Image (tube, rainbow, N blue to C red):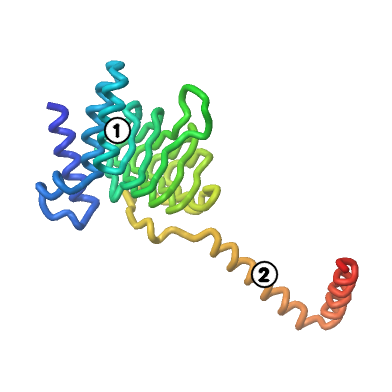
Amino acid sequence: MVFFKNLKEDIHTVFERDPAAKSTIEVMLCYPGLHSIIMHRVAHVFYKRKWFLLARLTSHLSRFLTGIEIHPGAIIGRRVFIDHGHGTVIGETAEVGDDVTIYQGVTLGGTGKQKGKRHPTIHNNVVISTDAQVLGAIVIGENSKVGAGSVVLQDVPPNCTVVGIPGRVKVRKDPTQGIDLEHNKLSDPVAEIINDLQERIGKLEALLQDHPSQRVESAKISEYDSKNSD
């Protein structure tokens, strides 16, 4: 049966991506991310048959048991791994591809009350790190990575790393490298800006040291600005 084939894949995925997994029975009993995926598949079948209340009740039970909220209308691909997923929310029209990894606190949410497609589409082999918010009917290209705490409001091309608020593409990677789960090694855009400013200040100070006349002129400008501000 397809259900058991998918379950076998899901268990193998846990062992593949979580070094803490010790045994099959442990994975089946103690991994809420796995439980949420299994219960979502059941809820999604009910949803497609338009048994909406039963679908929502199944989804609600899953949220109660796992702390992970997946709307029964969401489309979830194969070998999706939700690691430490407490607080994760996936909206009704979200689409998640194959081999995606999602960490705790992630939101695949909408940005308004409009009908129709209003949640993100996540392509294959994407990693979405802790507390990232991916909002609106946008597309995250395959093999891309969303940094921890990022707020992504625009499409992300394939093979990219996006970080920051709002999310900006910082790195383009080789698509042949496969899935990279080391989301702790992402760049810090705030730190980069501060370092750039410090570098520019250092260059300006050196320039003033080399040109005393410019230093005097700068002092006059500062004195003028101070008088005007008073």
Judge left or right: residue 144 versus residue 4.
right
| Residues at circles 1 and 2 in contact by the CB criterion of under 8 Å | no
For the point 40% across and 33% down, the residue is 91
Q: Quadrant of residue 106?
A: top left
Q: Is residue 211 above or below residue 176?
A: below
Label ID, residue 200 = 2
Q: Earlier in the sequence, mark 1 or mark 2?
A: 1
Q: Quadrant of residue 9?
A: top left
Where residue 85 appears, as percent x and y from the top left, is 31, 47
Where residue 118 appears, as percent x and y from the top left, is 47, 29
Label 1, secondary structure: give it.
Answer: helix
Q: Is residue 138 above or below residue 27?
A: above
For the point 25% across and 29% down, the residue is 58
Label ID, residue 60 = 1
Question: Whole-Å distance between the Cαs marked 1 and 2?
Answer: 54 Å
Front disc: 1 or 2: 1
